[in-house]
Amino acid sequence: MLLRTLFVLLFFGVAVSGSAQTNLVVFVGDSITYGCHWAAVLGNPDIVNQGVSGNTTRDILARLDSIADPQAKTYFIMAGINDLRKNIRPDETVSNIRKIVLALKRASPDADIVLQSILPVNSRIRPFMFGTSIIPEVNAKIREIASPDARVFFLDLYSTFADEHGRLKEDYTVDGIHLSAAGYDAWADILRLWRQ
């Protein structure tokens, strides 16, 4: 238990034994990522939130110069739901995510890159123009990008956030797609346990 606690403290940049551990963590995504003050929630002032409302994978690719940081230790990426909303083909979404990973690896060769699954949505709360069953299919393709040997990992959030019908749990959302405080708490809990 002590080792796990020390890992969390080191990973999220909390001072241990009186010495500050700098550990730049960059969150990349759209409004779902943007909607949380990750530095406060995870207790690390060195977290940078690069979520931008409405961003597709195309948009993230276009602004990579402002995201990539040679000092970054970890990138957490969640992208793709706006691609589906804007009728971007899943194959392009996955290809763009692969390009994002390659570009960030060039900028930060020693960084861990964590590809987070696209979250489910709740079509009972809000109608969507795409078939929501496609989300697990896209997630399966994103998972294939992961390569632990290259320090590229896949983190399955979908399973925690989906109800028995594959919909975003009502307690976790405010409008069928964006997260409630309970949703962000659940996400943060998963991040705290990551790699323990």
Image (cartoon, helix red, strand yellow):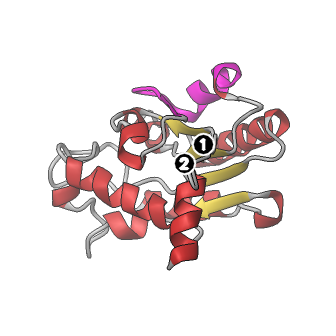
Q: CA distance from mark 1 to mark 2?
A: 4 Å
Please indicate whether residue 101 sits to the left or right of residue 177 in the image: right
Rendering coords of residue 98 (x, y %)? 72, 45
Q: Which residue is mark 1?
A: 20
Residue drawn at (71%, 29%), measured in percent from left and top?
A: 69
Residue drawn at (32%, 60%), measured in percent from left and top?
A: 186
Residue 31 location, quadrant: top left
Q: Which residue is mark 2?
A: 15
Residue 146 in magenta stretch: no
Residue 53 in magenta stretch: yes
What's the magenta region? 47-66
Rendering coords of residue 33 (x, y %)? 42, 39
Three-letter code, disc 2? Ala
Q: Nearer the viewer, residue 91 or 143?
A: 143
Rendering coords of residue 138 (x, y %)? 54, 57
Please indicate whether residue 89 sits to the left or right of residue 184 in the image: right
Q: Which mark is residue 178?
A: none
The secondary structure type at the circle numbered 2 is: loop
Residue 157 location, quadrant: bottom left
Residue drawn at (78%, 35%), measured in percent from left and top?
A: 103
Rendering coords of residue 183 (x, y %)? 27, 54
Relative to 42, say whether 108 is above or below: above
**Disc 1 vs disc 2: Cβ atoms closer than 8 Å?**
yes
The secondary structure type at the circle numbered 1 is: loop
